């Protein structure tokens, strides 16, 4: 990467900045997830390399500014792993994965508090939230999952999945009530609340709403493709068919 960025190297690489590379970081992460889902180890190795390239690229940009080098990135990561695993490196005791996550969150909050206090004389300015650190640019359902985890780590959560399920019903009732009140803005707010609560219900069931929706979208696309194939075999298309015929074709695709 140093050679690519140097004079006589690659013009495209030489033009890049931290900001210009942001879309590629996201894209490579999604391609890595696709490789994991495919079960193809060769594709997985390729995509891990592409993700690593993003790390190396950003570190090279920082080194050019004399901010830090890739060795600093690795050293910080190693120190963080040791610091956040006291049950492995410092004699602390945990019994379950849930305790590990709760301890991890507690340590992160302490780290953020120390960082804030180090740079601020005013104690109020040094205060941090338990929800800090969840990127707003995350996919919304994944962000809902992470925010729910952060809140749960400090005791702000339903006691069990049944409590969340009741809340889902409550949110749906409020959405319907907003429709009957002819309040379009409130309907949209209630839809958002219902989605957030569904994400919390998935979390309490040990699942991630983002992954569940991705799986549901995959099923929908597969079934829709099958429906199109079935109809094409009869010389028909999806557009132009009445609702009853479409429902019949859809149910047949689901059975397949």
Image (cartoon, helix red, strand yellow):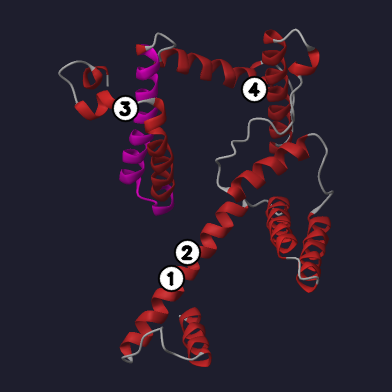
Looking at the image, do the residues carrying marks 4 and 2 touch, with CB atoms under 8 Å apart? no
Q: Give the range drawn in magenta.
A: 36-63
First in sequence: mark 3 vs mark 1: 3
Observer-nearest of 113 and 15: 15
Tell me if mark 4 has few (under 14), some (14-19) or many (20+) residues whose alpha carbon lies within 10 angstroms of its own.
many
SS for tag 2? helix
Disc 2 marks which residue? 218
Observer-nearest of 201 and 173: 173
Horizontally, is 245 left or right of 228 in the view?
right
Disc 4 marks which residue? 84
Instruction: Name the image quarter holding residue 169.
Output: bottom right
Observer-nearest of 252 and 94: 252
Disc 3 marks which residue? 16
- For the residues labelled 3 and 1, the Cα–Cα distance comes to 38 Å
Q: Is the magenta stretch mostly helix, strand or loop?
A: helix
Disc 1 marks which residue? 222
């Amino acid at each position: 990467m140093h050679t690519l960025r140097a004079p006589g190297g690659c013009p495209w690489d030489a033009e890049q900045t931290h900001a210009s590379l942001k879309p590629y970081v996201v894209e490579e992460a999604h391609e890595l997830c696709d490789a994991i889902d495919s079960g193809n180890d060769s594709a997985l190795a390729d995509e891990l390399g592409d993700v690593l390239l993003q790390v190396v690229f950003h570190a090279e940009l920082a080194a050019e500014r004399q901010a830090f080098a890739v060795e600093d990135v690795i050293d910080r990561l190693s120190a963080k792993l040791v610091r956040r695993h006291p049950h492995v490196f410092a004699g602390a005791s945990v019994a379950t994965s849930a305790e590990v996550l709760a301890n991890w969150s507690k340590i992160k909050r302490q780290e953020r508090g120390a960082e804030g206090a180090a740079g601020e004389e005013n104690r109020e300015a040094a205060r941090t939230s338990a929800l800090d650190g969840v990127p707003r640019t995350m996919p919304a359902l994944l962000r809902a999952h992470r925010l729910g985890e952060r809140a749960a780590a400090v005791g702000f959560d339903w006691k069990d999945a049944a409590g969340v399920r009741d809340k889902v019903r409550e949110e749906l009732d409020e959405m319907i009530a907003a429709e009957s009140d002819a309040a379009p803005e409130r309907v949209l707010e209630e839809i958002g609340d219902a989605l957030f609560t569904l994400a919390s219900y998935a979390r309490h069931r040990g699942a991630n709403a983002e992954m569940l929706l991705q799986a549901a979208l995959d099923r929908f696309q597969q079934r829709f493709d099958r429906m199109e194939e079935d109809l094409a075999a009869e010389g028909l298309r999806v557009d132009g068919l009445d609702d009853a015929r479409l429902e019949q074709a859809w149910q047949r695709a689901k059975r397949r």
